[in-house]
Image (cartoon, grey):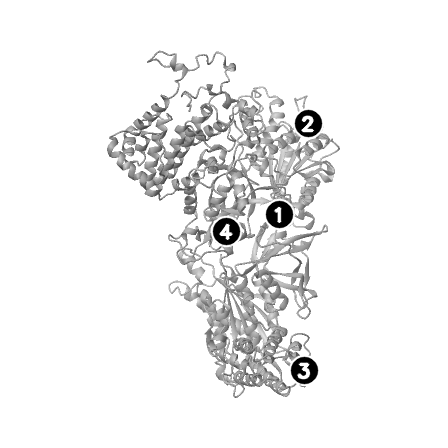
Amino acid sequence: MPTIIAVDASLSMMRPVPGRSDHTYHSLALKGVGNLLDNLAAAGKLEHLALVAFTTVTELKVDFTRDYDQIRQAVKKIEAVDKACLITMLKTAVNIMQAWGAQNVLQLVVFTDCGLGFGSTSISAFLETYIGRESEPEYAWLKTLATYKINFICLGVHSDAYFTNGLALYQQLLDAAQLKGQLFMTKPVKAEGGDGGAGGQNAGGATSHVSHKSELGRTAVFELVERLCESSYKLTEVKLKCGSYFRLESSVMLWPPVLPYEQPAVYDGDPIIRTIDQRIDVCGYLALSDIGSPASLSRHWVLPKVERTASRRSSGMAAASKPAKLTLDVTNPNYEFEKLEQDVRDFYLKDPKDAEESGDDADVTVVSKHSTLPLSEQQKETLCVLLHGALKMENMAALVLLGEKWYGFIYAFTDAKKKSNLMLNVLPPGTNVIPWLGDIEMLGFAEDISPGETASFPVRAERRSYSQSSVVWIRQASLQSDVQKVLRHAKKMPDKTQHFYKELNRIRRAALALGFVELLEALAMLLEKECAQLTLNGANTECTLQLQHAATELRKTSNRDIKSTIVPLQKVGGTVDAGAATAATAATPAAYLY
Amino acid sequence: MFERNHKTIFVLDHTRYFSISSEQYISLDFLKGKFPSGAAEGAGGAGGSALRSGDGTMFSKSLWTCAVESSIEYCRIVWDLFPGHKHVRFIVSDTAAHIVNTWSASTQNMSHVQNAMVMVGVPPRSSVQSSDYSVIHGLRAAIEAMAEPTDEQLKAMADGCQQISNKGRVICITSARDNTSMKSLEDIFNTVMIQQNALAAPPAKKGLVIDHCHLVILNIVPLGIESLVTNRNLLDISPLLAVEIHTVAAPEISSKLTHLIMRHYDLASTTVTNIPMKEEQNANSSANYDVEILHARSAHTVVCGKDVSVLPTSIKEGAAYETVTLKWCTPRGCGASDLQPCLGQYPVTPVDVTSRPSSCLINFLLNGRSVLLEMPRKSGGKTTSHMLSARGGEIFIHSLQITRSCLDETPSIVDGPGGRVQEYRFSEFAQHVKLSRLMPLKTKSVPPDSLRPEHERLCRRLRYFPLTTGTSILYHLQRQMTWLPHFLHLIVKEDMEKPDEVRCQQHIYELYTSASRGDMLPFAHTNGARLKGNKIKDQYRLFYRELEMLILMTGQTQTPHHKNLLESLQSLRTAYGDITPKTEPAHLRSYTESPLSPERLEPNTVISSSNSVSLLKASKRRMSGSGQRSLLDIISSAERSQSSKRLDFSGRLCTPLGQVAKLYPDFGNKEKDSPTPGSTPVSKEEPLRS
């Protein structure tokens, strides 16, 4: 989900936050950006981010990158210039986003104090000219912008009329241009006491006497960013299951998040919004070469879920000093398995003394690390890595069930730089979405094949016009080349007698289907001429006799029937040479049926 | 649901007028001698000049031939691109309507239509033209055909769909005198349709109500003849009917229909340019050719959205539509198996199916190779926007992603959680993957509703599967102990039989003897070094525990053999002090049946014969003599005889009889100073010494 972070660099951002001598709006915005980066980094640094600062002009500070430090450095250098011009920024954002096309979910995060702008570049001035002229080409960029998700982190306090006016106008802009926007703001603190708890983001901050301190500060901004991440940057978490053993069912994160799919109703009615199931089940495996490159709705990384909370199995110092089983949860249904695995793991650990003795052993050093360091995430085995390794080894993919009559496949994807990870391709819902695999629900294992039956990919389609010898004479050239082919064989008779009649019948049949009797007559004449020609040149008698025979047969109205086939002249009087003999033996009518 | 192009009906005028010539003449003399390739090679240039043109080999197609060939070409494209989804019917009209095919799938194909057309034949030239001959019969039949449901519509009815949309298109190839007769044609059509809908309404309910019909009238004239009928764009005649009229010279019908089909099915054209092909004459040189193909328009729009201007286009000579020109990329070992990020795949068909460049491209693709197509980028450079590949005898155009993707830089799995763990059981899982390969079945015993049963079967195959050899004794040792893989294979067999069990029992016994000898298990990373202290005992203890787990997991479909194995294993573990013998009676029973138990009497006796049959016999013999001793008795006596040979634990020696010896009396006082390996509080058993 490529994201542009836009920071308002107008002079108004330099105002101190009311009641807070330690913060300006600007410093809060920078803290907010930092917090957003922290959140996204914790989620795996997967998002591509760009940074712009906007005033009268919008300046791209950092182009799309996954190197968040670059943004951290650049954001510090943003300085206030003049007035905010939101419209220019939005327009520039559309340009910056262009490289991503329409296949990605694009997002915009704006840190602003909701300034209204001044004069002709102000929001109200824009709205005045825009409303009523929506469809004019000059506003076409707004149609593109409408596909983005726009998030405003609105910095301000509700007792500030300038800010609340701004909010109203921003909302008006979003509605007028039909943008998918959301304004994130602190909850207003009631001016009177009584229900001070309502707006209390800061613990203990809500006193009956209202101070701005409780409404807008570092914590409040972090909370806004938190809400933003929750609503827009949440990975899809599902359970992946490929076996009964408890380790073969594991929580995985899908990134980018799997979007709901709008499935048109089968016959009538409204489309159904579908989301994938919470558990995706592996139903079997397919060779990647059999799958090919089918159309997919979307692609996602399948990443192991990182346990943020202290893991129950974290051993390390704890495991070394006290029995490992104490860290296991006895009530866990998999307790027995976990305990066995832990005991085996402990068994393989060498005593520290032994490790010293045979310190040169590579395995031992790895193992001994386990006992001294906390078992870090990287060292805990995951299903994703096992599945990835096995699939990569076999060049195969796991077919997974994503929902009712909805499938996808997981495979090891390797990029040009040889970096590899587990990827999920989500297929469109339905069971007939890959024609060459046939009905997905008709797939089964080798032992299900009934005796005497064979099963292999691809599932063959009926023959298309291009894979059978179609006759189309719309262009004269194709008619001429077909006729030419017959003549070519004619000249090579008796060697090519079979081919000659095969082609002749092909043409005759096509001509009959088109009611093209003129061609039959023309062809008969042509053959006669050819015959005369060849006789003059002293050609084989067999050849001339066959040509004469073919011409006569073409003219017979009794042969204008679908079932009739012109067969070679059986007996060639007197001159039975080797060639004629072969022609005669091959002259069973069946040989010419096609 | 059912779009207008779901049903198309061609009405072909088969009246006498259609037997006349299209006035476009074809000469076959052209072939003789002068033709650059082919003919010359056969004739050797000998008699080329003997025949002059105008010798009577000039002939022309009739209007009928033009109408048939172009309408068949229309459905060739439809059936290539939308197999089984879009239906085309033919009705021939002279003194009555002749139905060529129906909506049923068996008649919706080229060979059926062509064979039927052989029987129709060209309209007789000699017959007397009477008022009986009319296209009206065909139009009436077309309306009736429109009211007939297709298989899909029947299914929708069966599924309980109340409102089945039923729109369609009638393409009528006829010839009318003037606008007035055209008008009357329209009026009759409209009236008949209203009548038909009245029949379809309750109570009669004969057929489906026609929601709307699009009538395309192609008014055909021979080449060079002016028509009194004026062309007209789509016009609504009634709420039910919209009509358009085109007057076309007979040789142009095909081109007209190609233009119309693009609109009718929302098709787009792509021209693959710069295809290098060997010359027929000179195999050493190659020239570049272009091939034009048709496909659903989405193949373009899905790549670049509604703004198709990104794609390079051109207009072919004589055509009024644009074709997207994409350059052929000579494949560099790019097989059809390379997975491309694909946004959509659509069947294609060549515009000119018989031309040599088309068939070259088609054969190249049908032979399993795929072709990437590239387009220039506005910013300079090139990018591959499409791919052509054939699968199962069908050619598809794949639309690829041309914009940047957020998945561009792969986060390496090695850097992720678990990425650095060394001992994954990759090859064993890969083996499972290979064995669980899916195949396309022709029949299934139960009509499938989902692949969940397959998932469940798959799960059953992996009841116990530690991910790494670092968390398993059995799968770790599998590579070192030659008998172990087969043993494990026998254990997980769902249909274990008696010989299998005997075999397993034997292995378990051998394991026991080596355990009692204190043999080391051949772990890979110990490098043959001696295990210290209690680990020697632990290795067997864990082995048994894991084995029991494995049998328990597999044993969910338990055979009595699994049960027997489990019981002997549990007894072993009891003997080993691993579990407390709570379930004594069960053991007793099991061991009266076990073929191995009596042999335990003297564990030091090495059994020379490993033959399971003799073992079995021996056991039966012993059983009768040894009375009712439980396995526990047997093993503990073996233990006793073992332990009697060695010095007792010193702690026990200095503790008065009857009292419990206290282990590590100093434990807890100076924790840091007790690094002795055997001093962890878990191990309460004395170390086994051999």
Secondary structure, mark 4, is loop
The answer for how far apart the CA atoms under marks 2 and 4 are is 48 Å
Q: Is residue A203 or residue B82 the one in the foreground?
A: B82
Q: Do labels 1 and 3 share a chain?
A: no
Residue A320 in percent (x, y) is at 51, 22
Which callout, 3 or 2, points to the residue nearer the camera? Answer: 3
The reply to whether the C-beta atoms of the residues labelled 1 and 4 are less than 8 Å apart is no
**In the image, are marks 1 and 2 on the same chain?**
yes
Whichever of labels 2 and 4 marks the residue nearer the N terminus, that label is: 2
**Chain of the residue displaying label 4:** A
Q: Where is residue A456 in the image (x, y as percent from the top left)?
A: 48, 56
Label 1: how many residues lie within 10 Å, few (<14), some (14-19) or many (20+)? many
Indicate which label's residue lies in the foreground, 1 or 2: 1
Residue B579, image x and y in percent?
A: 36, 26
The residue pinned by badge 1 equals A102
Q: Name the residue under label 3.
A: B46
Are callouts 1 and 4 both on one chain?
A: yes
Q: In this view, does B104 lie to the left or right of B345?
A: left
Residue type indicated by callout 3? Ala
Task: Indicate the secondary structure of the residue bearing disc 3.
Answer: loop
Q: Say which element carries label 1.
A: loop
| Circles 3, 2 touching at the beta carbon (< 8 Å) | no
Q: Can residue A424 be seen in this view?
A: no
| Residue linked to disc 4 | A264
How far is the residue under mark 3 from the one under mark 2? 96 Å
Q: Is circle 2 on the same chain as circle 4?
A: yes
Q: Mark 2 points at which residue?
A: A27
Instruction: Please name the amino acid that badge 2 sits on.
Output: Ser
Residue occupying the point 43% across, 12% down:
B665
| Observer-nearest of A260 and B326 | B326
Of labels 1 and 4, earlier in sequence is 1
